[in-house]
Amino acid sequence: MPDQRVQGTIQFRGTPIPIEGSWNESAQQIVFHSPYAAYSGHLTIYDDVQIQLRHLVLTGRLRMLPPSLQAGEYGTWVATTDINLPEYSGYVPPQPSSTSLPPVGVFVTSNILYGNSRR
């Protein structure tokens, strides 16, 4: 299956930042960039029927780009968000096995490294 186009915005401190990239459903891999950063990683989707939420978890590598004040810095990035299941009627992913990390164990974190200066 060919990559699907991704286009939208990310809210950063209340400011919408445009993004565009691609999504490979079979590999669950997503790549996108904004005017300030480039991201490559995986998107995992968990449906929690008991609380009627779909959890979206991004894990991957983030690289800051000019004109960001952190241009050249890079690191790993984990981010989560959720959607109310009753309001969503789109793609239903295969559910993770019982040994997968449950949505309750997901948290937001980042690890930014400073170019090659901290190797």
Image: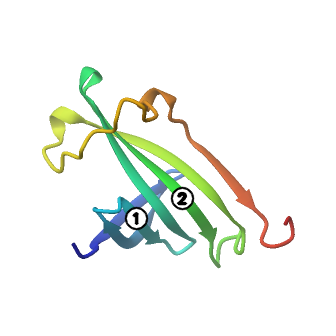
Among the 4 quarters of the image, the one containing residue 5: bottom left
Residue 49 lies left or right of residue 62; in this view the side is left
In percent of width and height, residue 105 lies at 51, 30
Label 2: how many residues lie within 10 Å, few (<14), some (14-19) or many (20+)? some
Q: Secondary structure at mark 2?
A: strand
- Amino acid residing under circle 2: Gly
Q: Position of residue 44 (x, y in %)?
A: 38, 48
Which numbered tag is attached to residue 12?
A: none
The residue lying at 21 percent from left, 35 percent from top is 85
Residue situated in front as seen by the camera: 56 or 87? 56
Secondary structure, mark 1, is strand
Q: Residue at x 59, y 64 (%)?
A: 62
Residue 30 image label: 1
Colour setup of the view: rainbow
- Position of residue 1 in the picture relative to residue 80 (left or right): left
Q: Residues within 10 Å of mark 1 (few under 14, many from 20)?
A: many
Q: Which sits in the foreground, 115 or 66?
A: 115
Residue at mark 2: 60
Placement of the C terminus among the 4 image quadrants: bottom right
Of callouts 2 and 1, the N-terminal one: 1
